[in-house]
């Protein structure tokens, strides 16, 4: 008994897999409501994000979570065409998605290809030519156990995921081998998205503490490096704990630290 | 005396390029059309009515990046890694192009007034280059009249000063 509800009405509410979201402009089966005139033309392209699939009547929910919506034209010139709907769900297990930037650990070198562990069901492959300035004679200096920040070139359920460390124009733009020292740890995927949101208070507050470097991978892995080991561990503890702390608790904790 | 039968050349041989060089344009065209006919007849197609493609307004996307406008994953604070800080500004400004448009007007190295002054004198000096000799002499006289005050000092400078023992 799947519920058929209007998409706009359930924004911000919990949706379950199997629910069908009706979009304005789609004629219903009985043909009563045919509001094509108002909605169809100005809508443009609608982005159907993670957790949703296209179906005959509208959008079919495939994951449980909160339904989110970004209105069309919001956010300046960067927004694509129409609005976007997606399901904000929580999980710890990462599924490789094309275009995602992730931190991988090199597990093996097989000829011209490195095998990386990205936390998915399969190991990703990375060719040695996929680094900036790499040629057959000039190979990148990658050893087993190194950390690599790259993006997925190919990631679907039928093929082995492939990663690269350059973008479409051939520049590395920050991707590649992550340097020495530092600390790598794993958090849930929802926290990563919270930290990467445009105005994240946690990151802003942490940046006031001490100088440090941070790499966030969409597979739930975070790498931190600060000047001393103690500072690094403090940042790690805050990031791990801030998922379940309220804003006040976090500010109290940080105040204690900056007092020390 | 036997009437020699011309050796019959095969169709494929006649279709080759070197055999067609001697032909007229018309015969060439005819041959081409025949070939096209043969190809189009051999071409297989489905004898079904055209299905109208449903206009899809909806794009399926499995990544969170375009939905939530996430920032770039590498960050550095308080100058820990200057290259990454530069990269942060670059990458995050790609998302927020509006802010960049405001800063389009670059600060000029030379102010407008100075440019105007320089141009004034420049026009004069380069203009002199293209004057004829008569006009140049006129100009020189004008200059001398103007600089008559500085003359005595110049003359004084030019005189040789004998070194005193």
Image: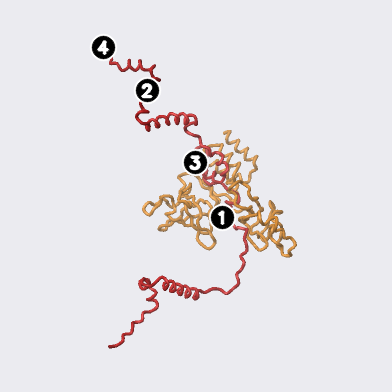
Chain colours: A orange, B red
What's the distance in space between the residues labelled 1 and 4, CA to CA?
95 Å
Q: Of helix, strand and loop, which one carries label 2?
A: helix
* Sequence-earlier tag: 3 or 2: 3
Label 2 vs 4, first from the N-terminus: 2
Is A211 drawn above or below residue A167 in the view shown? above
> Where residue B25 sits: x, y (%)?
41, 70
Label at residue B86: 3
Q: Are marks 2 and 1 on the same chain?
A: no
Q: Position of residue A70 (x, y in %)?
A: 64, 50
Q: Is residue B58 left or right of residue B148?
A: right
Answer yes or no: do the residues labelled 2 and 1 have beta carbons within 8 Å? no
Element type where label 3 sits in the image: helix
Query: Dot 4 corresponds to which residue?
Result: B164
The residue at 55%/37% (across/down) is A209
Residue linked to disc 2: B141
Q: What subunit carries mark 3?
A: B
State the residue at coordinates (37%, 24%): B140
Pick the quarter of the image with the C terminus of chain B: top left
**Chain of the residue that carries numbered disc 1 in the rendered image:** A
Q: Are marks 3 and 2 on the same chain?
A: yes
Q: What chain is tagged by disc 2? A: B
Q: Quadrant of residue A254?
A: top right
Which residue is labeled 1 in the image? A94
- Quadrant (top left/top right/bottom left/bottom right) for the N terminus of chain B: bottom left
Which chain contains the residue that carries disc 4? B
Q: Residue at the spot x=63%, y=44% of the render?
A: A245
**Distance between the alpha carbons at the discs numbered 2 and 4:** 38 Å
Mark pair 2, 1: CA separation = 88 Å
Circle 3 crowding by C-alpha within 10 Å: few under 14, some 14–19, many from 20? few
Q: Tag 1's secondary structure? A: loop
How far across and down, in percent of the image, does residue A44 sit? 63, 55
Query: For this rendering, which residue is in front, A50 or A253?
Result: A50
């Amino acid at each position: 008994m799947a519920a058929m509800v209007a998409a706009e009405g359930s924004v911000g509410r919990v949706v379950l897999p199997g629910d069908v979201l009706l979009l304005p402009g789609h004629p219903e089966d009985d043909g009563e409501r045919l509001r094509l005139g108002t909605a169809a033309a100005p809508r443009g392209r609608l982005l159907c994000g993670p957790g949703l699939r296209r179906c005959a009547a509208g959008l079919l929910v495939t994951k449980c979570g909160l339904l989110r919506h970004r209105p069309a034209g919001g956010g300046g010139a960067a927004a694509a065409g129409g609005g976007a709907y997606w399901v904000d769900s929580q999980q710890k297990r990462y599924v490789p998605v094309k275009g995602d930037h992730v931190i991988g650990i090199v597990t093996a070198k097989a000829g011209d290809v490195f095998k990386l562990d990205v936390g998915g069901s399969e190991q990703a492959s990375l060719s040695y030519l996929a680094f900036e300035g790499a040629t057959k004679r000039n190979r990148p200096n990658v050893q087993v156990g190194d950390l690599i920040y790259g993006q997925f070139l190919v990631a679907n359920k039928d093929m082995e995921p492939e990663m690269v460390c350059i973008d479409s124009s051939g520049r590395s733009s920050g991707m590649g081998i992550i340097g020495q020292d530092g600390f790598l740890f794993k958090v849930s995927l929802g926290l990563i998205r919270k930290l990467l949101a445009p105005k994240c208070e946690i990151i802003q507050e942490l940046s006031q503490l001490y100088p440090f470097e941070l790499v966030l991978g969409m597979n739930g892995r975070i790498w931190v490096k600060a000047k001393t080991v103690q500072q690094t561990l403090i940042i790690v503890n805050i990031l791990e704990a801030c998922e379940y702390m309220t804003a006040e608790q976090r500010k109290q904790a940080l105040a204690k630290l900056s007092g020390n | 005396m036997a009437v020699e039968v011309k050796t019959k050349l095969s169709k494929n041989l006649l279709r080759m390029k070197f055999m067609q060089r001697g032909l007229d344009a018309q015969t060439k065209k005819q041959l081409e059309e025949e070939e096209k006919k043969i190809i189009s007849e051999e071409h297989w197609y489905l004898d079904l009515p055209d299905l109208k493609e449903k206009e899809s307004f909806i794009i399926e996307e499995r990544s969170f990046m375009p939905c939530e406008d996430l920032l770039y994953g590498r960050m550095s604070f308080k100058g820990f890694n200057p290259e990454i800080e530069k990269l942060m500004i670059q990458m995050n400004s790609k998302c927020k192009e509006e802010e960049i448009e405001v800063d389009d007007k670059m600060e000029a190295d030379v102010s407008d007034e100075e440019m105007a002054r320089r141009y004034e004198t420049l026009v004069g000096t380069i203009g002199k280059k293209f004057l004829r000799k008569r006009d140049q002499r006129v100009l020189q006289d004008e200059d001398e009249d103007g600089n008559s005050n500085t003359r005595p000092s110049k003359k004084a400078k030019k005189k040789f000063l004998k070194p005193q023992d």
